[in-house]
Image (tube, helix red, strand yellow):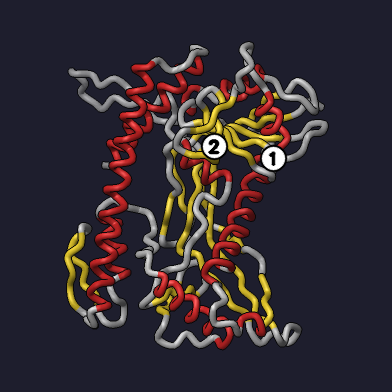
Amino acid sequence: MREEFSRHRHGAQELIARCERENRDLTDSEKDANHSRFAAMKEIQDNLDFTQATAERAIFSALDGGHASGTVQTPFGAVTFPSDAPGRAEFEENRRAAGDDYTSHFTTGDAGRRQQFSRALSHWARTGDAGNRFATVTTVSGGGILLPRDVALPLEVRDANAFRVAIAAVGSQVIFTPGAQDLTLPILDQAAGSVVSETATVETSNDPVPASIKLTAKMYQSGSAWFSNLSLEGLQYNLEASIVPELNHSREMALEGSIASAIIADAALASVLLPTTTTVSYPAMLNLIRGVPRRFARQLAIIINSEVFGALEKLVDSTGRPIMNLDPANSEVLRFNGTPLIRSDFFEAFGSGKTVGCVLSGLGFKLRDAGQAAIARYANVPTRPAQTGFNGFGAHGFGYSPTAVVKLKTPV
């Protein structure tokens, strides 16, 4: 179903991009074709959501029925749940085996479960006593994150930073590893392939140029958020909705800033210049896209600062129409000549010789998550005797081929 969904989405995007290149509107037949595609995509997504919800509800139904252990049948296979870990870990394994890499949130729409989780997490925040409400999972990120045994998992921020949005927009994916050891990926040269001779007596080969992307995991944090213990005494204080997503978002912003800073400081990257230190032009943006060599000229995404983003929004063609269009599948993404375009506030502002953005290829830029994110709790700190602190941690790595990223700069 996911392959069919991808085909429909790719077909719709190609059609829109073709119309943009030809500077015309969709014909009636093309509109009908796209309507059919979007209807098919919605039906597939509804089926996927229903399948996931059916699996989750099967586990919940068994638990609510008072079963301490046993086996239930789900669309992802049979799940056995022992009393010390009621089905969730094994259910996640079955989902991964079925090809679903997304984290389950166990969202059943049951407001009572969310309230139960809020009360349990508030009790932990006030006292540090997890009791039997949570299972502690030790991860490579060095923290013990608390996962609820009998209630819904907290919500997590998805696609919080611009580079995650870019990777998703080009159809690539973030690499996940349960461990934090260094990961090295080979980069094949564009001339790596060769013709196999029918009469060869030895192997014919054209070895790739030795090159690789090294993804070293580093620890990123959100920074500590402190709360009055008096505030945490409120049983209905919803930590799930207010603290965890905020910490995750802050950590993702730290990761985005680190990637942008590395690109800005990398003198080995090629660059394309804007016409002046404060203006943007259509030809300059075309040159940016064309600056990526042919071997990496696929899965391209543009990431730019707010000033360039605002200037591009105002550019129009000869008929007065804006040159940038909304992505039909993602409202956070605009498209420039069909290429996804995302805003980041971590690139430099307008000025002399500033890096104001970049274009990157999903084939040569890789982002990695190592292990599971963790939430640290700080209590009984002498300098903050009446407060409790929370900090979010996660291990991430990134790397790229020097020719897979081209910087957008202002002239000196």
Q: Position of residue 294 (x, y in %)?
A: 49, 22
Circle 2 sits on which residue?
333
| Foreground disc of the pair 2, 1 | 2
Residue ID at (35%, 65%): 108
Residue 107 versus residue 180: which sits nearer the camera?
Answer: 107
**204 to the left or right of 154:** left
Closer to us: 226 or 25: 25
Q: Is residue 287 left or right of residue 19?
A: right
Q: Look at the image and tell me in which quarter the N terminus lies.
A: top left
The reply, left or right, for residue 194 in relation to residue 391 is: left
Dot 1 lies on which element?
Answer: helix
Evaluate if marks 2 and 1 touch, with contact meaning CB atoms under 8 Å apart: no
Seen in the picture, residue 72 relative to 370 is either above or below; the reply is below
Q: Can residue 185 be spotted in the picture?
A: yes
Report the side of 67 relative to 368 (left or right). Answer: left
Pick the residue in front: 293 or 197.
Answer: 293
Q: CA distance from mark 2 to mark 1?
A: 22 Å
Name the quadrant of the C terminus: top right
Name the disc covering residue 88, or none.
none
| Above or below: residue 292 compared with residue 2 | above
Dot 2: within a 10 Å radius of its alpha carbon, few (fewer than 14), some, or many (20 or more) residues? many
Instruction: Say if 23 sits above or below 271 in the image.
Output: above
Which numbered disc, 2 or 1, marks the residue that appears first in the sequence?
1
Give the image location of residue 207, x and y in percent: 39, 30
- Which label is found at residue 264? 1
Q: Residue at x 28, y 71 (%)?
A: 60
